[in-house]
Amino acid sequence: MKESKPKTRKPHRPNKRKIHDRFFKLIMADSDMTRSLIKGFFPKHVSEEISLDLLELIPTEHISQQLGISYSDLRYRTIRPKNGARVILHFEHKSYIPAFPIQLQLDEYMLALWGDDRRQRRVLSRVVPIVFYHGKRRWRQKPLAETFEEGPIEWDSFLPDIQYLLIDLNAIQEEVILQHRKAPDLCTFLITLKFAHDLEELGKRLPLLVSLSWSREAQKELGSVVLRQAVVHYINELLAMNKISVSAWKERLSDEGREAWMRMAEEYLSTIPEGLLLDAMGDLSKELLEQGRQEGREKTLQTIIANMLRQMPDWSDEKIAQILGVEASLVAQIRQQIGGGKPESDQ
C-alpha cells in the first residue's frame, strides 16, 4: 500500500479584488470620511439636497430570489430636509471594469431596497447609486442599449437604463484632489487608491501622504489613526499581491520616500492590536529590522520596541522579543529606559 504524500500548503495569494474592497469599505464606513467625499466630489444637486448631519450607515445584506444572499458595498441613509423624504446613498466600489453592465447590478440592489420599503409599508425611498472606481483605465458610462444586438431605437426605452453618479479616480487629477487639503485624510485616501495599481508612482507620494495624515494634528484624531493603519496594511498587501518584497520596493524609493515609509510602518507596527499584529508583522517587520541592521539604524529598532512597550505594556519581554526577532535582554533594557514596569506574568 502506497503511503500518501502529505499535502503541501499552497502559499497564500491575496485576492486582488478583496484587498481593494476591504480598504474601501473600512475607510468609507466612517461617516466623517463619507461626508467629506460628498462635500468635495458630489454634484451640488445631490450634496446640497440631503442632510449630511443625519448620514447613517445601514446593513447592506438583502435577499434575492434569483441569486440568494447578496452583498452590496455600502449604503447610507439620510433625508431630504425640504420634505423629509428618505434617501439612500448606495456606494458600489469597483477596482476593475466588470464584464457585464453595472446597471444590472445596481438595478438588483435598488429593487431590493424598494421591496424592503413595501414590506415595511413606507413610501418608496429615493436611491442615489454611486459607482466609485479606481481601475487601471478610464470608466466609460455607456447606455445599457449598447449591450444588446441592434434593434429599433424605440426599444431602448424598454430597458431599465438607470443613471448613476460616477467617481472615477482616473478622471480626477491629483491637483484637484489636493484642493481639498482641509480634509487631509480624504486626500490621503483618494491618492492611495488612485495610484494603487502603480506602486512606483504611489511610492513617490509617500512623503505627501505623511505630510497629510501623519502630522501632529492628525495623530489626535481616532479616524485618522484608523486610516493610517489601513493605508500601511493596504500597501503591504499590494506589495504581496504583486510579489514584491518590502526591501525591493524600498530600494526604488527616494531617500525621502524611504524615510516616509519608515515613519508610516513604525507607527503601524507599534499600534495595531495583538490579533492583527501577528498576521501583519511578517514581511513588513522583517524588512524594517533588516534595514536597522544593514544600515546601522539601531535607533529605528529601539524606537519600534519602545513604542510597542508603551502601547502593549502588559506584553512580556520574551513575547515582544519573539515577535521582533531580537534578544529579550534588549527589550528589558529599553523597558527600563522608558520607565516601564515589568509585567506581572514575568515577576
Image (cartoon, helix red, strand yellow):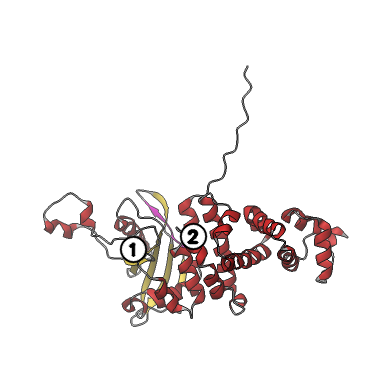
Residue 114, which numbered label?
1
Task: From the viewer's perspective, tell me whether residue 150 is left or right of residue 187.
Answer: left
Measuring 50% from the left and 58% from the top, which residue is drawn there? 22
Residue nearest the observer in this picture, 3 or 84 = 3
The residue closer to the viewer here, 210 or 193, is: 210
Give percent across and percent down for residue 330. 81, 60
Give the extent of the magenta segment.
59-64
Name the residue carrying label 2: 200
User: In the displayed structure, does residue 61 sit left or right of residue 329?
Assistant: left
Q: CA distance from mark 2 to mark 1?
A: 45 Å
Q: Residue at x 17, y 58 (%)?
A: 156
User: Is 55 positioned to the left or the right of 334 in the image?
Assistant: left
Residue 157 lies in magenta, yes or no? Answer: no
- The secondary structure making up most of the magenta span is strand
**Residue 106 or residue 98, whichever sits in front:** 98
Q: Are marks 2 and 1 in contact (CB under 8 Å)?
A: no
Frontmost of labels 2 and 1 is 2
Q: Amino acid at mark 2?
A: Glu
Q: Position of residue 158 (x, y in %)?
A: 18, 58
| Disc number placed over residue 205 in the picture, else none | none
Tell me, yes or no, if residue 125 can be seen here. Answer: no
Q: Secondary structure at mark 1?
A: helix
The quarter of the image holding the C terminus is bottom right
Which residue is at the front of the view, 157 or 97?
Answer: 97
62 inside magenta stretch: yes
Residue type of the residue flagged with mark 1:
Trp
Query: Residue at left 47%, top 60%?
Result: 196
Residue 240 pos. (x, y %): 55, 51
**Which comes sooner in the sequence, label 2 or label 1?**
1
The 10 Å Cα crowd at callout 1, few under 14, some 14 to 19, many 20 or more, is some
